[in-house]
Amino acid sequence: MESTIITLLTIAVILLSVVIVALLATATLVVVKVNKIARNVDAVTNNLSSATEWLSPVKVFSEAARAVRSFRNN
């Protein structure tokens, strides 16, 4: 009877260890994928920021005025 309990407890500990290792591996993969998505979102945000800066009316008109002034000076 005593050896049966020890065997069952050993099996339970082994199964729990396998489950914990699997959960840690899954959590690591999820963190890596979230990090990759965050880097992609950061790159898209930077590109959108640059595009928005160039398409702002103030920037467009100031660049047009600068081009006209340089055309008049030449």
Image: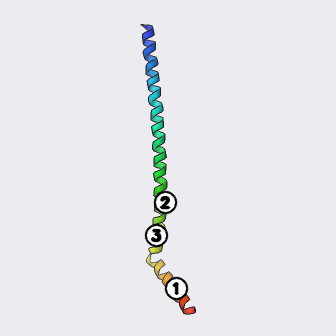
Where residue 41 sits, quadrant-wise, is bottom left
Q: Earlier in the sequence, mark 2 or mark 1?
A: 2
State the image coordinates of residue 26 (x, y, percent, origin top left). 45, 38
Cα distance, mark 2 to mark 3? 12 Å
Q: Is residue 50 above or below residue 37?
A: below
State the image coordinates of residue 40 (x, y, percent, origin top left). 47, 56
Q: Earlier in the sequence, mark 2 or mark 3?
A: 2
Residue 67 or residue 57, whichever sits in front: 67
Which secondary structure lies at badge 1?
helix
Q: Please say if the residues under marks 2 and 1 sit with CB atoms less than 8 Å apart.
A: no
At 44% from the left edge and 19% from the top edge, which residue is drawn?
11
Q: Please say if the residues under marks 2 and 3 sit with CB atoms less than 8 Å apart.
A: no
Q: Residue furthest top?
A: 1
State the image coordinates of residue 47 (x, y, percent, origin top left). 48, 65
At 47% from the left edge and 53% from the top edge, which residue is drawn?
38
At 49% from the left edge and 49% from the top edge, which residue is drawn?
35
Q: Which mark is residue 43?
A: 2
Q: Which residue is mark 3?
A: 51
At 49% from the left edge and 54% from the top edge, which residue is drawn?
39
State the image coordinates of residue 62 (x, y, percent, origin top left). 50, 82
Q: Amino acid at mark 1?
A: Ala
Q: Quadrant of the N terminus?
A: top left
Q: Which residue is mark 1?
A: 67
